[in-house]
Image (tube, rainbow, N blue to C red):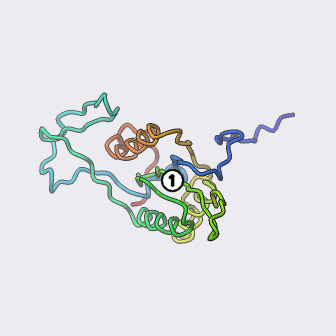
Amino acid sequence: MPNKFVQKSYRYKNYDYSKSGGYFITVCTKDKRHILSSISIDPVTCPNPRIDAQKVDEKNHTQITIVNDRFVYPNLHLTNIGKIVEDTFIEILNFQKNIEICSYVIMPNHVHLIILIHDSWDPNGNFIGATTTVSNIIRFLKNKVTKKCGAQIWQKRFYDHILRDENDFCNHSIYIQNNPVNWINDEYFSMIGGIS
């Protein structure tokens, strides 16, 4: 009888996740709670905001908000937990010297980031290869943030996408940059909220 509790793996079969390369990662909060940040229009830069239109930019596939006859880029405000996550990104860079975080965004209930893992050489110039894996990096992130918060805030799994080429890298970088603009259309937008 098959085990109905076996969870589907979202990892690519036969792919070596310890290889150097680029990875687009998404990590969600437990129960999709909105505890990492909030998104708003700044009343200082936009007094008496009136949403005139929400148009779709076909070129970049983003929704543009027009307020008081001009485009407004929303402000992203990190909560204390969000600040802990951001500080932990710096620790990740110190965790392994061959890791690079190219871009990231801390949304209310999820985090997107692009990680590059570079090959390493020993002091004698001998090739070592990558010295960590995507799983180790995300485990480090989750464990550090959980310890600092004193509570489990993360979903068990994470989503990864192997960046195939420069075009794939650029598309995912733009996606990260535009994530606050597209928050109202995000699949996680209507999920249960949480503390700020």
Most distant residue in the top direction = 58
Give how far across and how far down residue 172 sits, in percent: 44, 42
**Quadrant housing residue 178:** top left
> On screen, 92 above or below 76?
below
Q: Residue at x 66, y 60 (%)?
A: 128
**Seen in the image, is 179 located left or right of residue 146?**
left
Quadrant position of the N terminus in the picture? top right
**Seen in the image, is 185 located left or right of residue 144?**
left
**Quadrant housing residue 54:** top left
Q: Residue at x 62, y 65 (%)?
A: 125
Neighbour tally class for label 1: few under 14, some 14-19, many 20 plus, Cα within 10 Å? many
Residue type at numbered disc 1? Ile
Give how far across and how far down residue 169 sits, in percent: 45, 42
Residue under circle 1?
115
Give how far across and how far down residue 62 sits, in percent: 32, 35
**Seen in the image, is 151 located left or right of residue 188?**
right
SS of the residue at dot 1? strand
Most distant residue in the right direction = 1
Q: Judge whether residue 156 can be spotted in this image.
A: yes
> On screen, 191 above or below 86?
above
Q: Residue at x 41, y 43 (%)?
A: 189
Query: Which residue is more in the foreground, 89 or 106?
Result: 89
Give how far across and how far down residue 111 sits, in percent: 47, 52
Q: Residue at x 52, y 50 (%)?
A: 28
Q: Judge whether residue 110 can be spotted in this image.
A: no
How many numbered marks does the figure carry? 1
Query: Which residue is more in the foreground, 176 or 152?
Result: 176
